Image (tube, coloured by chain):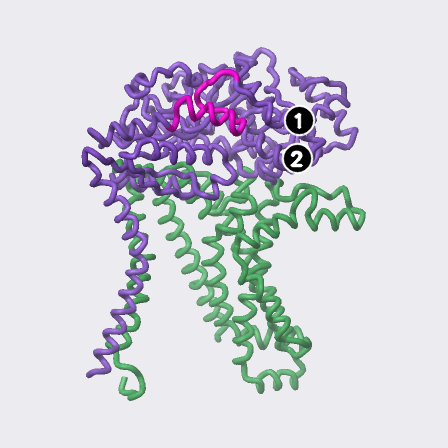
Amino acid sequence: MQNPIAPKKHVLLLYLLPGFLLYTFVVVVPIFVAAYCGFFNWSGGPKMRFIGFRNYAELFKDGVFWLSFRNNILLTVISAVGQIGIAFLFASLLSSGLVRAKAFHRTVIFLPCVFSAVVVGFIWSMIYDYNYGLINQFLKLIGKGSAVKPWLSDPKWSLVLVTIPLVWQYIGYYMVILLSAYSSIDRSVLEMAELDGATGWKKAVYITLPLLKNTLFVCLTLCIAGSMRVFDNIYVMTGGGPGNSSSVMALYAYNTSFVRYRMGYGSAMSILILALSLLIIGGSRGLLARFNRKEGT
Amino acid sequence: MMRTIRKAVSAFLAVGILFLSACSGKAAEKSDSAGSGKGESAQKVELSFYNDYTTQNRASDNNAKLFYDMMQQFEKENPNIKLNVTEISQDNYSNKIQAQNAGGDLPDVFFLKGSWVQSFIRNGSVAPLTDALNQSGIKDKYRRGIFDPVTSDGKIYGMPTQYSVTCLVFYNSDLWKSVGYEQFPDKWDDVLSAAKKFKGKGIPATIALGNKDKWPFESTILSCLGDRFTGTDWTRSIIARDGKSKFTDDGFVKALQFSQKLAKSGLFNADYNAITDEQASTLYCQGKAAAVIDGFWDVSYINANASDEVKKATKLALLPAVEGGKGDTKATSGGAGWFIAENSSLEGEKKKAAEKFIMAMTGEEYSKNLTAKYGLIGPVNVGKTDTSKFSNVTQDYVNLINGGVTLTPIYDIQMDSTVIDVMNTGLQDLLNGSVQPADLAKQIQDAQDKAGAK
């Protein structure tokens, strides 16, 4: 680093120190403490009984946990397709010049991700409400009154219904990331493509998409990470119910520790959630890297 | 050189500020508890007291308001006892007290929720109050069974601060009259046939239910309905975890089957698993439901939110009997949910002062004032009180309870927390038909087995 303008190494380290220390104490240390607590039978009081790997053994047989895991995966898939897919569509539209008032659209689409998850949860609970909700009122208006039902009470659809607000909330987030990626594409490449006859949809899929690949991978990683730890929206809308139909791992871990007072078991669960999330993210990146290489890019 | 030093200093200052801001909360607390620990002089005694009656709480909960008024009165009458009071909101209270218990640094006097008391007793954190109670001379006036959650080995470890009745039927007598019932039916078959008539009249719910938060059905209906089928001995055995009674026993399974039948018959509003307890009460207050089954807190809610028409027509009743049930038909679920406890490490003057304070706050005077000033029921049975200045709903409530109702334990105050959570979650599924009664009973029993013996 012979660059005279770049700061010296020890200066860099000093500036990074506060953030690094904070991160260590707030994120890394609790993970080790949780791993430790996972080996005990502990109900939150002063008595902790060492039981080795029994908590982990119980976890592997815990039907509710794996149901929650399955729900998280489903949620991730729907979010990835919905959030990133729709964000890509909007980003394409906004940067193609077909749409006027770009700044206005950008702001409005981005606005929901600034809202607190609890607020979004409550708004959508109201939309789904049986007596006064928008959906049922709309159905009654168009004459389909027989389709009216208490939406969030249906165990078959509760997970999908609870995912929709999540998708709605974060489209703007990914759209902004993709828009900035779009602006980094060289104009001349797109012009040449148009001269060759690739317009609209063809241009988006065959030209722009491959160029945005890296950004899309980043978006996917963020989406998976966010979907693995979703909690607030679901807590507010259904609390995991009815029964366990919309339960997700973070909710179940919270319930286990703070409602059922099984903190040892809950700690073990948190560690397993971390391990599973890292596995999924790592796995998806590995898959995409293989996909990259196959395409020969 | 100077620039490097300046940069180093600014970096450390930044880190220092971060840590100071993180630690400032702790420092403030430390000074609190340090101040109270030293008050051992013969003249003045200082007691640290933790409760969850925050200012916000006191504005809407009369139990809390009266407690604080009497506490200030106590301090005036006992100038040698100084109370260092810390109020924490109910949501955070559990975490705070449990953390202090884990750290061995509990305050001198503190509130405890009924369901935590046994684990505090096991840890040796709380002192027995049996002697103080016996000395008070009014031990027999306390409502039957109220000390069950805090009793261990024949000793009592907490004094009740309030009294909850969770299963009360609030019904709109005008609406029931219109389908031919002068009073709320005392047979379930009549309730179910009335439901059909109500539907015909366009009233969407016969009984309003809001089970989104999972606890309402279990706490306000099943705790009492279950008792109708199983009898109270079964419940006490489950609570004691002595293995004699199981959730897979006939009585409880029948209670689950009956609950499922009620839900299937359209007795409740269609969105019962999607709305909260309060929203269900609102349905009733708007006249859109013929009745609502809820706890004593609905007395104030209905007083505050119902239209005059609904309020005047509101009467109270007990849950109807079931055929062939073992339980007392004049019973309903009730008990004290919260207690006040004494730190087991107190001795001498501090111990005397703490016990004086505890007994004064939970004695006859508190219950008398509670009924006379606010129309609520307290832990001590004070006999007839003049309630004529209160609304008809309040009067009905006081008369019903004082008129000889037997109390059975409220499930979620005394059973193991995991068992209750499995039960609550499973009940949502049971009611909408996703799980069968026998299977749910087995799941709950599994949780009970895992919880082990007490």
Which residue lies at the image location 28% right of the left edge and 68% below the top edge? A17
Question: To which quarter of the image does residue B179 belong?
Answer: top right
Residue B314 badge: 1
In the image, taking residue A86 as reference, residue B251 lies left or right, namely left
In the figure, what tint was chain A given? green
Query: For the point 39% across and 41% down, which residue is it?
Result: B93
Position of residue B153 in the picture relative to residue B268 (left or right): left
Amino acid type of the residue that numbered disc 1 sits on in the rendered structure: Thr
> Which stretch appears magenta?
B361-384
Pointers 1 and 2 in contact (C-beta within 8 Å): yes
Q: Chain of mark 2?
A: B
The span from disc 1 to disc 2 (Cα, nearest Å) is 10 Å
Q: The residue marked by circle 1 belongs to what chain? A: B
Percent of width and height locating residue B189: 68, 17
Q: Which residue matches tag 2?
A: B306
Seen in the image, is B278 located left or right of residue B359?
Answer: right
Where A12 sits versus A291, above or below? below
Badge 1 crowding class, 10 Å Cα cut-off, few under 14, some 14 to 19, many 20 or more, is many
The reply to whether residue B357 is visible in this rendering is yes
Q: Secondary structure at mark 2?
A: loop
User: Within 10 angstroms of label 2, few (less than 14), some, or many (20 or more) residues?
Assistant: some
